[in-house]
Image (cartoon, helix red, strand yellow):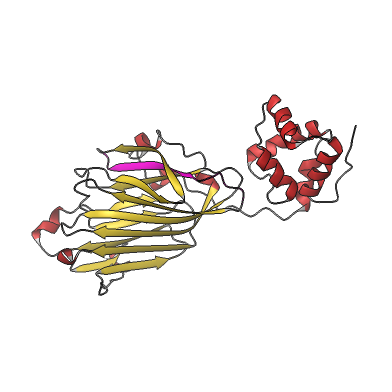
Amino acid sequence: MGRVSAPAAGFADVLRDAIERRGLGLERIRDHLAQRGVSLSVATLSYWQSGRSRPERKSSLAALPHLERVLEVPPGTLHASLGVTHTRRRRAPVVDLDALWPGSRHERVLARLDATWDTELDRLSVHDRLVVGADRRQSSLVVRQVLRARGDGPDRRVVLHFHDDTAATPPRIRALRGCTLGRTASDAERGVVGSELLFLRPLLRGETVVLEYELASPDHGPLESAYGRKFRTPTTDYLLEVEFAARALPTSCSTMGEPDEQVPLALDPAHRVHLVGSGLSTAGIAWSWDDDEADDVGDVGEAPS
């Protein structure tokens, strides 16, 4: 029986040596693990032994004792070797959706979607581009996000969008780049729409993905006087652009917040305003029209990140 002594090398070296001594192919190792009720893909095993990734998620760490038995190495050999490689990156806490949206406004929609991997993705950058039509209603929203996997396995991102104008038809979500559309759910009574954005392949720890999707209303979009976003994790960069049709130029625009914290924003020649920020918990732009029609405009349309 091949044995590996207490390791002085890193995890990848110890695992590779153990596999060579055991004389099993990765497919055989996967099958032996499956017989023990442990699911590890051949790709994951390959990346572990090459050093491209390492076990960090709870489920991956739980698989190590079973892998040690299959490879016939002393208990704790693989787990101990993890301490030889680089220190695990500190993970920023992920705010629960219930903290972002008190009450049950999102529950019906979220219950129909798979948000299992949502806490395993860091938000590196988010870019929202909102277009307000000549009828003063939101006509489209294009969102671009750059995400990084905290561990092996993330294969989707759940997105939720809210608007206060519940008389409007829920917008449709369309995948544009880096993803395909999975399950979609909406609750018109609460003005909530959500969808799973499926990555083109599962991510490994540290890998990044660029996603782009669009929300567009099939008829009349929501009539809102602001757009904002709440962030579940710290985001390195956030850019929000709002573009107004020439026939629907607002009389004032500002950043959202308390009255003494609002910053006036001026329209550029292309009828756009924008804000840029980093490390934010909330951000948004509000606007207004000085006439009676604006009195019926809803408060805010928001999205969690």
The quadrant of the picture occupied by the N terminus is top right
Q: Nearer the viewer, residue 71 or 273?
A: 71
Judge whether residue 201 is colored magenta: yes
Q: Nearer the viewer, residue 80 or 199?
A: 199
Judge whether residue 206 is colored magenta: no
Q: Residue at x 42, y 36 (%)?
A: 113
| Vertical comparison of 26 with 246: above or below | above
92 horizontally vs 59: left or right: left
Q: Which percent across, then down, holds residue 136?
A: 18, 58
| Vertical comparison of 196 with 295: above or below | above
The answer to which image quadrant residue 241 occupies is bottom left
The answer to which image quadrant residue 64 occupies is top right
| Vertical comparison of 59 with 223: above or below | above
Q: Which percent across, then down, holds residue 27?
A: 71, 34
Q: Which percent across, then down, holds residue 297?
A: 18, 54
Q: How many marks?
A: 0
| Residue that protrudes farthest toward the top in the picture | 35
| Residue that protrudes farthest toward the left in the picture | 292
Q: Nearer the viewer, residue 42 or 40?
A: 42
57 horizontally vs 302: left or right: right
Q: Which percent across, then down, holds residue 256?
A: 31, 62
| Residue that protrudes farthest toward the bottom in the picture | 269
Q: Nearer the viewer, residue 141 or 78?
A: 141
2 horizontally vs 283: left or right: right
| Vertical comparison of 80 with 277: above or below | above
Magenta residues (range):
190-205
